[in-house]
Image (tube, rainbow, N blue to C red):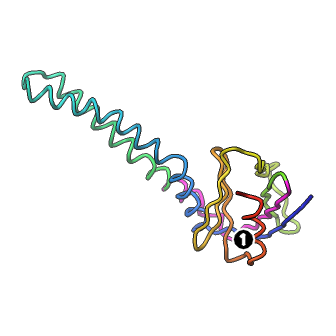
Amino acid sequence: MEKLKLLYTADKKDFLEGYDLYHKLYRQKAVYIKAAIFLIPLLLFIQQICMDPYFYMGYLCIIVCTAAIVCIILTPNMERRTTERALENISGRKYQFTLYEDRLTVERVYPEGEEPAAKIMSTEISLGEKSLKLIETETVVGIFTKAESVVLPKREMNDYDLETIRKYIK
């Protein structure tokens, strides 16, 4: 049974804020862990070089570990810039968010006369999903799982909409 239906317009800024929330929620910890995995051998190779300055393989290993750490730390920034460029043409698109008792769906709404070039799949998230999380900021409501994310702008919601979403997504 349908509990809430919300029509909203997509905005690049809102999607980027949602991307940042998703990254902090699910991926940032993994970045730190991967960097620490390379930091430990880096420190051990530095110690080895201090004890034996003629251990030339240690210098190569220090360079490799440092490069790996830099790549791991910079990858999320490059991914965000790529996502930002991909969202250039998304402003003005309309979407429909529908909340049911057991799931939620998001579908793109096309203007009359405009049909999609290919069959576009809608996003559907089960409310029983274990990794389901709701995060609110001043401008957006983010609904996240490990595999999916939905970002709803608060500017197009009233208090009833927010309360209904909070009630069904805990």
Instruction: Note whether 61 is above or below 82 in the view shown.
Output: above
Task: Please state the horizontal and vertical placement of residue 18, each as a whole percent of the image.
Answer: 59, 60
Viewer-proximal residue among 47 and 20 = 47
Q: Is residue 47 left or right of residue 91?
A: left
The residue shown at (37%, 41%) is: 71
Instruction: Note whether 47 is above or below 21 in the view shown.
Output: above
Q: Quadrant of residue 87?
A: bottom right
Q: How many marks?
A: 1
Identify residue type, mark 1.
Thr
Image quarter in which the N terminus is found = bottom right
The residue shown at (80%, 52%) is: 117
The question of residue 113 being in magenta is answered with no
Viewer-proximal residue among 79 and 163 = 163
Q: Quadrant of residue 17?
A: bottom right
The question of residue 97 being in magenta is answered with yes
The residue shown at (70%, 57%) is: 170
Q: Is residue 67 left or right of residue 49?
A: right
Viewer-proximal residue among 69 and 138 = 138
Specify start and end residues of the magenta stretch as a single range: 81-101
Q: Residues within 10 Å of mark 1 (few under 14, many from 20)?
A: some
Instruction: Note whether 86 is above or below 162 in the view shown.
Output: above
Instruction: Note whether 70 is above or below 65 in the view shown.
Output: below
Q: Which residue is mark 1?
A: 9
In the current view of this chain or complex, which residue is farthest to the right?
1
Asked which secondary structure carries label 1, the reply is strand
Task: Please state the horizontal and vertical placement of residue 58, each as a whole percent of the image.
Answer: 18, 25
